[in-house]
Image (tube, rainbow, N blue to C red):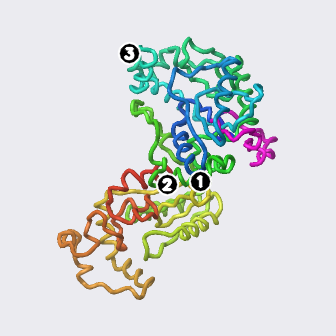
C-alpha cells in the first residue's frame, strides 16, 4: 500500500479496487522475511529502531546492513543474486534493513520476501540528504572509508546557494543520468524501480511506471512518517507477524519513539522551517475541529468566533460545559467523549474544557486540535477572581447545591495577599502539588489523562507528554 501519493494516485475508475484485501501483498510473499529496502532520508532509522523493539515482543530475528561504502545506485545481475542469497540465509521469521534498490528474488529461483518501505516529500528529502552529507559524523565515517575530507567550502555550502548557482549536486533535470559519484540520492523512485537501466533517468516516465508496478504488486506497505498514524495502523494490519502492537509501542511514554526522533541533524539550518512544516492541520484524518480549551485564556471569545464562523462556512458547532469533580478522565470517559464529538458528523467543531485525547489509541481518526495559551501569571490571577465573581460563584452553587458556602474572607482577599499568606491551595504554586479543582496548570490540557499529568509544574512533563502532543495535534 502506498500513502502520501508522491509515486502513485489511483484513477477514479480504479477506486472500486482499493479494498484492504486487494491492496495487501503480504499474502503473496513466499518466506517469513521482512525486507525494508530503505530509501535514504525518509526517517528509516526511526522505523529500524521500532522494528528492533518489536522483534523482542513478536519473536523474530532482526539485523541491518552495516555502515559501509556509499550506497550503490545499481547492481548487476550477479551482485543482485549474491545479495539475495545472503538475505535469504537468515532464519525465519526475520527482518532485515538495507539501502538497496528493489530486487526480484523470483528471477533467481528464490522465495520473494515481504517488502516494505517509506517515502517522504521529495523536496524535504533532498534537502535532508544535502545537509546529512555535510554533518560531522557523516564526514568522519566517510573518512574512515576513503581517507579523504572535502574542502571546507563544501561543508559550509547552503542548499539555497547550491540550487541558485546551478551546481551539479543540486540540479534536478528530467531524464538526467547519475553523476560521477555514487552518492546521488535524488531519485526516490529508484528504490522501487530496481536496477534496470531504465530506472536511471531522473523523473522519467519509464522509471515511474516500473516503480509503480513494483509498489502495486510487490510491496506490502509503503508508508510515510508524514502520515504517521495511518502508516502504523496499516503496518499492524497488513504485516501483523512483525508489527503487532506497533502503535502502542511507538506512543509508549517510557520507551516509545514518538518523543525520541532518530538521526536528527542539528546541522540543518533552522531557516528551512516553513509554515507548512509547522502546521499540523494536514496530519488530521477527519474534518472535525476539537477546541479542548484551556481556562482563562480568552477561550470564550474563540468560542463565539467559531459559532459565528459556523454559520458562514456551513459547519456544525457544539459547545459543552464540563462538570467539575475529577481532573483525569478514564479510558471509558475518553471513548464516550470521542463518540459524542464524532456523532455530529463532518464538517463540525466541538468546544469543551477537556484534556488531550489520543484518538489514534482509541482506533479513531485524528481531529484538528486547536487551543490558546496566555501568560501564566495573568492566567492564574484571572482564574482567581473569576471563581470569586458573584455570577460565576452562584452558577456553581446552582449546579452543585451541596457545595460548601465560602466565607467572606474567600471573596475579599486580593490575589497578592493570598499568595503571601500561602494558606489556600489556589495560591500555592509548588511543583508536584496535585489537582484541587483550580486552574493553575497550563500543561494539563496538552498532557492528557495519564497520572503524571496530575501534578503542578512537574519537570518530567517538559520533554514528554505534552510536547509530544503539540507535535501530534
Task: Mark 3: give few (<14), some (14-19) or many (20+) Cα within 10 Å.
Answer: few
Location of residue 144 with respect to 95 vertically, above or below: above
Disc number lying in front (3 or 2) = 2
Q: Which residue is mark 2?
A: 252
Q: Residue at horizontal 74%, vertical 41%?
A: 25
Residue 189 in sight here: no
Mark toward the viewer: 1 or 3: 1
Q: Is residue 17 left or right of residue 126?
A: right
Q: Secondary structure at mark 3?
A: helix
User: Which residue was labeled with disc 3?
Assistant: 153
Q: How many marks?
A: 3
316 and 384: which is toward the camera: 384
Q: Residue furthest bottom?
A: 402
Q: Which residue is mark 1?
A: 245
Local secondary structure at mark 1: loop
Up the image or down, 247 lies above or below 97; here it is: below
Comes first in the chain, label 3 or label 2: 3
Residue that protrudes farthest toward the top in the picture = 180
Measure the alpha-carbon separation of dots 3 and 2. 43 Å
Amino acid at each position: 500500500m502506498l500513502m502520501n501519493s508522491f509515486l502513485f494516485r489511483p484513477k477514479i475508475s480504479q477506486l472500486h479496487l482499493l479494498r484492504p484485501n486487494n491492496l495487501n501483498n503480504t499474502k503473496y510473499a513466499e518466506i517469513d522475511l521482512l525486507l525494508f529496502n530503505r530509501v535514504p532520508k525518509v526517517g528509516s532509522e526511526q522505523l529500524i529502531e521500532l522494528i528492533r523493539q518489536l522483534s523482542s515482543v513478536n519473536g523474530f530475528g532482526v539485523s541491518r546492513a552495516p555502515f559501509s561504502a556509499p550506497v550503490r545506485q545499481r547492481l548487476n545481475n550477479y551482485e543482485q543474486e549474491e545479495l539475495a542469497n545472503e538475505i535469504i540465509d537468515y532464519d525465519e521469521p526475520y527482518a532485515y534493513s538495507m539501502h538497496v534498490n528493489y530486487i526480484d528474488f523470483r528471477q533467481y529461483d528464490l522465495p520473494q520476501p515481504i517488502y516494505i518501505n517509506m517515502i517522504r516529500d521529495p523536496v524535504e528529502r533532498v534537502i535532508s540528504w544535502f545537509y546529512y552529507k555535510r554533518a560531522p559524523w557523516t564526514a568522519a565515517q566517510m573518512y574512515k572509508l576513503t581517507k579523504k575530507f572535502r574542502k571546507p567550502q563544501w561543508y559550509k555550502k547552503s542548499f539555497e546557494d547550491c540550487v541558485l548557482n546551478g551546481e551539479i549536486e543540486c540540479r534536478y533535470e528530467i531524464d538526467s543520468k547519475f553523476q560521477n559519484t555514487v552518492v546521488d540520492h535524488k531519485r526516490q523512485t529508484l528504490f522501487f524501480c530496481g536496477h534496470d537501466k531504465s530506472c536511471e533517468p531522473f523523473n522519467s516516465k519509464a522509471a515511474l511506471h516500473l516503480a509503480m508496478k513494483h509498489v502495486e504488486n510487490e510491496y506490502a506497505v509503503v508508508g510515510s512518517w508524514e502520515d504517521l498514524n495511518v502508516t502504523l495502523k496499516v503496518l499492524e494490519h497488513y504485516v501483523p507477524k512483525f508489527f503487532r502492537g506497533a502503535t502502542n509501542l511507538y506512543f509508549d511514554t517510557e520507551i516509545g519513539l514518538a518523543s525520541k526522533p532518530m538521526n536528527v541533524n542539528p546541522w540543518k539550518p533552522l531557516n528551512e522551517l516553513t509554515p507548512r512544516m509547522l502546521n499540523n492541520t494536514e496530519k488530521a484524518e477527519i474534518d472535525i475541529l476539537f477546541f479542548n480549551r484551556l481556562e482563562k485564556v480568552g477561550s470564550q471569545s474563540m468560542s463565539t468566533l467559531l459559532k459565528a464562523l459556523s454559520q458562514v462556512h456551513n459547519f456544525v458547532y457544539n459547545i459543552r460545559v464540563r462538570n467539575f469533580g475529577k481532573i483525569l478522565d478514564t479510558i471509558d470517559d475518553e471513548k464516550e467523549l470521542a463518540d459524542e464529538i464524532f456523532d455530529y458528523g463532518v464538517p463540525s467543531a466541538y468546544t469543551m474544557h477537556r484534556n488531550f485525547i489520543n484518538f489514534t489509541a482509541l482506533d479513531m481518526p485524528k481531529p484538528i486540535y486547536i487551543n490558546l495559551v496566555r501568560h501564566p501569571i495573568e492566567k492564574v490571577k484571572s482564574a482567581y477572581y473569576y471563581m470569586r465573581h458573584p455570577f460565576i460563584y452562584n452558577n456553581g452553587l446552582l449546579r452543585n447545591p451541596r457545595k460548601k458556602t465560602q466565607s467572606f474572607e474567600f471573596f475579599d482577599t486580593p490575589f497578592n495577599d493570598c499568595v503571601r499568606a500561602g494558606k489556600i491551595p489556589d495560591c500555592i504554586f509548588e511543583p508536584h502539588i496535585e489537582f484541587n479543582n483550580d486552574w493553575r496548570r497550563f500543561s494539563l490540557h496538552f498532557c492528557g489523562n495519564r497520572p503524571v499529568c496530575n501534578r503542578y509544574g512537574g519537570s518530567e512533563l517538559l520533554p514528554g507528554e505534552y510536547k509530544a502532543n503539540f507535535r501530534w495535534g
